[in-house]
């Protein structure tokens, strides 16, 4: 057949060929490519061959519906570009207007297209929707999604990807991803790493650098690499997942997230808890152990919103019996939580803090200490501590120019990071010449409220007298200005 012959005649480089083959074997498959590495062509060809070769059946309750394919990107313009690439290479699969009318189908809007049934057993046309992921909640519709092709997925919000995955609960949806990397974000964690370490056999990936495209201009790439600089070139040209420049910590899951050397309390020199209470925000607790070699290990974590300290007292008792901590360091801004833990017999203390040269900033000096320990490979976290790992990969400075690079990080998704600081910095290398101070006093005792002064309400007469006085003062000031202006004019 003409379409089958076209599969053979279309040009592809070896990485595109490998990706098309892998897409037929994996439920989720990603083409991680550098600029002009052939991502869009690989996605278009993979989509076409899935539709042509694989007979993905709809569930019985959706038998009267048409199967759907979604082509998605972060903007409509990019999604339309992906559709146009499919149209250029596989235009024979798209129904013409007359053919749609013969089937009784109507296009609806410019973002809906219809493909011929091809060799599908059900003989049904396939509806293609071109969509944006700007509103993740809009991706909750339809039970009939057989294939989703996500272009430039590294730039999506994670909620969009999660909602898209939800379409495959009943229908055996297949997911094609084509993208350039963008930091070690959710795509790195949820798709790339599982495909590389073999933890999830349903996920696969192919990586293709810009220079791997046999039609690329090598001399131009060399010039572009110089303009981009090392880190940006690694991401955009070499298709590598590199750290975002604005991240607070240089955390690498492959290096810093491991199985602890022991889960036995006696293995560690000391155990401390870092406690960052919350309610609307997550309540974060880290169980940190320091080895005799000076390595810090996060052994357990607690991370949940809408809980209070009094609700967690049974949990704290179980963990205290297991780990026998030397101390529990609690956010100094939450003295009520510290006092409640104290009341229940726990070795609770407010977190220590030390100051920068101005004696005002306290966060960055403690962050610098944790950064140094991490760079020295002296901070590790348990493979089960996903919340802390995620915060390591999202905790960042404000994305502005270099003048603000030393300012405090953005106060968002930092609860496990705060708990880490409380634990480590309260016992590790606090400068002796920096006195530890607390805003509410050394004993954290609440200050007594003084008697409120009675509020005096003005009478109408008193109010008018004040207005008259203000007007008199204004006229005097204006008179002085007029006299100065007259003298200046006379001199001239």
Image: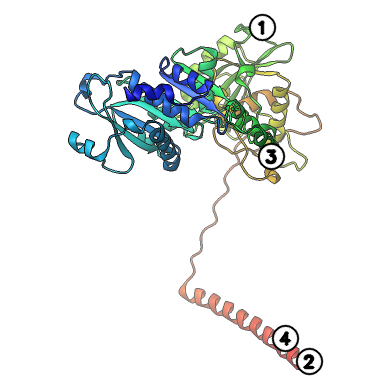
* Dot 1 crowding, Cα within 10 Å, few <14, some 14–19, many 20+: few
Q: Nearer the viewer, residue 348 or 460?
A: 348
The answer to whether residue 433 is above or below residue 297 is below
Task: Judge left or right: residue 345 versus residue 269.
Answer: left
Q: Label 4 neighbourhood size at 10 Å, few (<14), some (14-19), many (20+)?
A: few
Report whether residue 438 is seen: no
Judged left or right of residue 388, residue 1 is left
The image quadrant that residue 400 belongs to is top right
Q: Position of residue 11 (x, y in %)?
A: 48, 26
Q: Earlier in the sequence, mark 1 or mark 3?
A: 3
Q: Are marks 1 and 2 in contact (CB under 8 Å)?
A: no
SS state under label 4 = helix
Disc 3 to disc 4, C-alpha distance: 61 Å
- Residue that badge 2 annotates: 491
- Report x, y in % for residue 169: 33, 21
Residue highlighted by disc 1? 267
- Image position, residue 309 (x, y; %): 50, 26
The residue at which mark 4 appears reads as 484
Residue matched to label 3: 227
Is 466 placed left or right of 97 in the picture? Answer: right
> Which is nearer the N-term, disc 2 or disc 4?
4
Q: What residue is drawn where x is 37% and y is 36%?
A: 137
Task: Measure the C-alpha gap from mark 2 to mark 4.
Answer: 11 Å
Q: Secondary structure at mark 2?
A: helix
Please state which of residues 185 and 355 is positioned toward the viewer in this rendering. Answer: 185
What separation in Å lies between label 1 and label 2 (alpha carbons)? 91 Å
């Amino acid at each position: 057949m003409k379409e089958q012959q076209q599969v053979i005649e279309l040009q592809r480089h070896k990485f595109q060929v490998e990706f098309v083959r892998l897409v037929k074997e994996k439920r989720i498959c990603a083409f991680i490519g550098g600029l002009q590495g052939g991502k869009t062509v690989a996605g278009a060809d993979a989509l076409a061959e899935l539709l042509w070769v694989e007979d993905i059946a709809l569930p019985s309750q959706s038998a009267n519906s048409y199967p759907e394919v979604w082509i998605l990107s972060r903007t409509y313009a990019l999604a339309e570009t992906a559709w146009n690439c499919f149209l250029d290479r596989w235009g024979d699969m798209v129904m013409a207007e007359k053919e749609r009318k013969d089937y009784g189908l109507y296009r609806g809007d410019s973002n809906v297209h219809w493909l011929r049934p091809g060799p599908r057993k059900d003989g049904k046309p396939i509806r293609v929707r071109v969509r944006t992921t700007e509103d993740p909640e809009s991706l909750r519709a339809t039970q009939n999604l057989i294939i989703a092709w996500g272009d430039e997925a590294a730039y999506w919000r994670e909620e969009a990807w999660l909602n898209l995955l939800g379409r495959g609960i009943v229908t055996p949806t297949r997911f094609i991803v084509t993208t350039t990397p963008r930091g070690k974000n959710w795509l790195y964690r949820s798709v790339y790493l599982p495909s590389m370490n073999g933890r999830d056999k349903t996920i696969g990936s192919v990586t293709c650098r810009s220079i791997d495209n046999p039609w690329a201009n090598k001399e131009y790439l060399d010039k572009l690499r110089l303009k981009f600089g090392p880190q940006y070139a690694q991401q955009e040209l070499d298709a590598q997942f590199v750290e975002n420049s604005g991240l607070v910590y240089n955390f690498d899951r492959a290096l810093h997230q491991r199985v602890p050397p022991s889960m036995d309390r006696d293995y560690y020199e000391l155990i401390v808890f870092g406690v960052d209470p919350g309610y609307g925000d997550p309540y974060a607790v880290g169980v940190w152990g320091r080895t005799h070699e000076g390595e810090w290990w996060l052994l357990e974590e607690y991370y949940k919103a809408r809980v209070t300290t009094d609700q967690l007292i049974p949990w704290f008792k179980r963990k205290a019996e297991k780990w026998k901590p030397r101390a529990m360091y609690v956010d100094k801004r939450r003295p009520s939580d510290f006092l409640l833990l104290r009341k229940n017999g726990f070795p609770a203390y407010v977190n220590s803090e030390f100051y920068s040269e101005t004696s005002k900033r306290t966060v960055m000096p403690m962050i610098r200490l944790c950064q140094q320990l991490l760079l020295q490979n002296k901070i590790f976290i348990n493979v089960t501590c996903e919340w802390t790992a995620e915060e390591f990969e999202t905790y960042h400075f404000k994305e502005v120019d270099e003048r603000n690079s030393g300012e405090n990080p953005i106060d968002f998704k930092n609860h496990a990071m705060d708990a880490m600081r409380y634990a480590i910095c309260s016992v590790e290398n606090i400068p002796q010449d920096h006195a530890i101070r607390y805003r509410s006093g050394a004993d954290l005792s609440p200050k007594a409220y003084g008697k409120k002064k009675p509020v005096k309400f003005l009478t109408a007469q008193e109010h008018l007298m004040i207005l008259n006085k203000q007007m008199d003062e204004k006229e005097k000031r204006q008179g002085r200005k007029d006299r100065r202006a007259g003298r200046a004019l006379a001199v001239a």
